[in-house]
Amino acid sequence: YRLALANQPLQKMDALQIQSANQTVRATKGAMYPVVSMFGNLGSNYLNTPIQKGVPYSFLTDTIGHVTGSGTPVTTPVPLYKYIDTKAPGYFTQINNYFAQAIGINVSIPILNNGVLRTNYAKSKLNLRNQELQRDQDNLTLKENIYQAYTAAITALQKFEANKITVAATQKSY
């Protein structure tokens, strides 16, 4: 029986399933604790399209109001722009200009969660208990099979011995 417990694939499978269920219990219990995590990020951008640049080529005069009393108009020059395509800055220039970095800490504290975490923990403990009961049942079935095989072997040996005596007696009488 001990040899069969150590070598039968069903018993090995039961042991592995219990280990797995144990780890699941630990993981679901761990999910109920706060989590502190850190993160970091480095990045940059590069754009390979020409950039439009506005160049003033003329000015208009625009009236923006009148002086109270005299009625003299107040004017300001308004530039008119002509947009031209310019070459995009070089690769490394853009990488340096748009370089960005971030670092942070995240704290996640599970509060209540509608009881989901506690329910998952209870389910995982029940699953572990079910696996242990399944192992015990498989071990009992194995023991029963071994005892039946042993009993059948003893019975067959006794029949064989009885038949040997019968054959000897039959030969003697013949």
Image: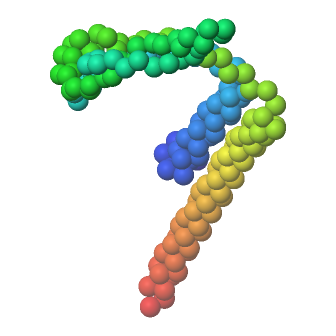
Count the marks.
0
**Does residue 10 sit above or below 154 in this rendering?**
above
Does residue 116 appear left or right of residue 27 in this picture?
right
**Residue extending farthest front:** 70
**Front-lying residue, 161 or 41:** 41
Does residue 49 appear left or right of residue 140 in this picture?
left
Residue 111 visible somewhere in the drawing: yes
In which quarter of the view is residue 32 placed?
Answer: top right
**Does residue 63 sit above or below 5 in this rendering?**
above
Residue 45 visible somewhere in the drawing: no
Q: Residue 9: x, y in percent?
A: 49, 50
In which quarter of the view is residue 26 placed?
Answer: top right
Q: Residue at x 45, y 19 (%)?
A: 62
**Front-lying residue, 164 or 40:** 40
**Does residue 151 sit above or below 8 in this rendering?**
below
Q: Residue 8: x, y in percent?
A: 51, 49
In which quarter of the view is residue 21 placed?
Answer: top right
**Residue extending farthest bottom:** 174
Q: Residue 34: x, y in percent?
A: 70, 20
Q: Residue at x 53, y 14 (%)?
A: 73
Q: Residue at x 51, y 72 (%)?
A: 160
Which quarter of the rendered picture does the C terminus lie within? bottom left
Q: Residue at x 75, y 43 (%)?
A: 123
**Front-lying residue, 82 or 168:** 82
